[in-house]
Image (cartoon, rainbow, N blue to C red):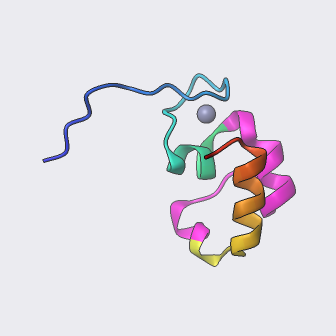
Amino acid sequence: MLVLSHYNACLHGCEAGEETSAHVLCECEALGSRRHAYMGSFFLEPGDIKNLNLGAICNYSKAAGLP
Ligand SMILES: [Zn+2]
């Protein structure tokens, strides 16, 4: 069983989410304009990720400051 011992608030300033890859990739409001610039949409569904170009995801991840 997975135990979440602490909550990592989003580092991008949206105050609406947790700093998880799913949040940053799909739903973080603070990154909407960058998501749109790199991946063509302000918000994504998790299922959309697999349809995206891997290069676009990499470029977005760098722009968003993901490791
Ligand atoms: Zn966020």
Single out the residue that lies furthest toward the left: 1
Instruction: Locate residue 38, reporting x and y percent.
Output: 82, 59
Name the residue at 54% across, 44% down: 23
Q: Nearer the viewer, residue 30 or 55?
A: 55
- Which picture quadrant has residue 55? bottom right
Is residue 41 shown to the viewer in this render? no
Q: Which span is picked out in magenta?
A: 29-49
In this rendering, does residue 55 appear at all? yes
Pick whichever, 67 or 16, lies toward us.
67
Residue 51 shown left or right of residue 6 in the figure: right
Task: Reply yes or no: does residue 59 show up in magenta.
Answer: no
Looking at the picture, does residue 24 appear above or below residue 52?
above
**Going 60% across and 69% down the picture, which residue do you hit?**
48
Residue 63 horizontal/vertical position (percent): 78, 46
Looking at the picture, tell me which residue is in the foreground, 17 or 59: 59
Q: Residue 40 colored magenta?
A: yes
Residue placed most toward the observer, 62 or 49: 62
**In this view, which residue lies farthest toward the right?**
37
